[in-house]
Amino acid sequence: MILLDSTVVVGLLDADDALHDVTLARLKGLASKHSFTASVITYAEVMTGVSLGHHEQSAVDAFFDAVLTDLLPVDKALAARAAMLRAQNASLRMPDALILATADVNDDVEMVLCADSAWPRVRGLSCRVELLKP
């Protein structure tokens, strides 16, 4: 399973986004062998875009229903792992730490797709982190 970061989801939703073409191509290449998931944190971040008028609610709902097999929750153990990642990586924001921890504690997640160049440098994760660039 591959966990999609918020920047990847936004890149797919917005045809004018700098990541749109590369993200679409990468997901098409992975779709035959992998399923996709996201953290509830990603959902919250994308829904912020809906609230700010960046995306239509129906497009976001359709994406999450059609592309993702599940939204992975945050619990106490995951929050503790996120806090540890945040403490070890001073530039890592807590929402990002929560998303990475979601992938790290979930044995089914093999890889995280993201657009944040700092994420592949986070050490000690149980999964790979792949950086997508425009």
Image: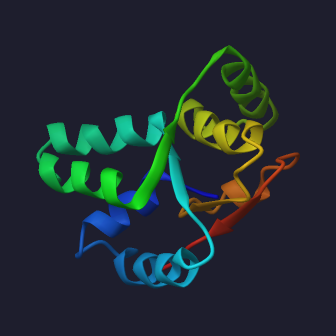
Q: Nearer the viewer, residue 6 or 92?
A: 6
**Residue at left offset 23%, top offset 75%:** 16
Q: Quadrant of residue 98?
A: top right
Q: Quadrant of the N terminus?
A: bottom right
**Residue at left offset 35%, top offset 76%:** 20
Q: Residue furthest top?
A: 76
Total of numbered circles in the picture? 0
Give the image location of residue 8, x and y in percent: 45, 62
Tell me: residue 16, above or below residue 60.
Answer: below
Q: Is residue 124 visible?
A: yes
Q: Nearer the viewer, residue 87 or 103?
A: 103
Question: Relative to 119, is 45 on the left or the right?
Answer: left
Question: Relative to 109, is 32 on the left or the right?
Answer: left
Q: Quadrant of residue 59?
A: bottom left
Give the image location of residue 81, x and y in percent: 76, 27
Give the image location of residue 126, x and y in percent: 84, 49
Tell me: residue 81, above or below residue 106.
Answer: above
**Residue at left offset 67%, top offset 68%:** 130
Q: Is residue 56 visible?
A: no
Q: How is the image coloured?
A: rainbow
**Residue at left offset 57%, top offset 40%:** 96
Give the image location of residue 58, x and y in percent: 13, 51
Question: Relative to 6, is 108 on the left or the right?
Answer: right
